[in-house]
Structures are given as C-alpha cells and as structure tokens.
Image: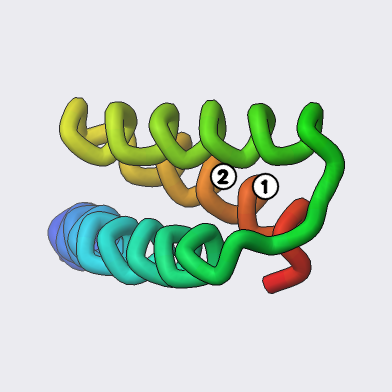
Amino acid sequence: MRSIIATALFVASGAAFAGNCPVEMKAIDAKLATKPTIAAADMTKVQTLRADGERFHKEGKHAESMKALGDAKKILGL
C-alpha cells in the first residue's frame, strides 16, 4: 500500500512540474519583452537556459526544465 501511495505522489509531483514549466517560460518571455538592461553574456545565457527549459519540458524532463528556467529567472532578477 505504501508503495502505491509513494508512486502516486511521485507521478503527481511530475505533473506539477510539468504544469509549472510553461508558467515559468511565460514569466521569462514577459521579462525579455521589456528589453531588460543586462550584460550581453547574461542575455545569451538567459536565452540558452530558456531554450533548454523548453526542450527539457518537451522531452518530459520537468525537473531539469525547472532548474534551467529557475537559473534564467535568477539572472533576470525574477
């Protein structure tokens, strides 16, 4: 019984990550639309992390997606 509950919680947590990825991408996109004044190297890093986050999301790697998107948000000050 415990293994069933643990499995259910694991699946639910994956679904929660999956649902958050698009929200995080949207927040990054909104900030980028304001043309923030950050160093060119930081902008390149943000764009790479944003693209990686979307790719990971599409591959079903939601923890990796959230990590990449979180790192992009930090650089942007979100």
The answer to whether marks 2 and 1 mark residues whose Cβ atoms lie closer than 8 Å is yes
Residue at 34% across / 66% down in the picture? 26
How far apart are the alpha carbons under marks 2 and 1? 6 Å
Question: What label sits on residue 39 in the rendered view?
Answer: none
Q: Is residue 9 visible?
A: no
Q: Please name the residue shown 78% across and 33% down the image.
A: 40
Can see residue 52? yes
Q: Label 2 crowding class (10 Å Cα cut-off): few <14, some 14-19, many 20+?
A: some
The percent coordinates of residue 61 (x first, y second) are 31, 33
Return the residue at label 1: 71
Q: Nearer the viewer, residue 1 or 47?
A: 47
Q: Position of residue 60 (x, y in %)?
A: 20, 35
Camera-nearest label, 2 or 1: 1
Residue 33: % across, % down: 46, 64
What amino acid type is highlighted by mark number 2?
Answer: Lys
Instruction: Give the quadrant of residue 21.
Output: bottom left
Given residues 2 and 62, the one toward you in this image is 62
Horizontal side of 13 relative to 78 (left or right) equals left
Q: Quadrant of the N terminus?
A: bottom left
Residue in the foreground of this view, choosing between 8 and 64: 64
Q: Which of the colour schemes (rainbow, by chain, secondary structure, one colour) is used?
A: rainbow
Q: Report the amino acid beneath label 1.
A: Asp
Q: Is residue 56 above or below residue 1?
A: above
Q: Residue 73 is drawn in which quadrant?
A: bottom right
Quarter assignment of residue 23: bottom left
* 40 vs 4: above or below: above
Residue corresponding to mark 2? 67
Find numbered disc 2 in the image and state the secondary structure of the residue it sits on: helix
Q: Which residue is drawn at the image coordinates 33% and 44% (left, top)?
A: 62
**Quadrant of the image for the C terminus?**
bottom right
Crowding at dot 1, Cα within 10 Å, few <14 / some 14-19 / many 20+, comes out as: some
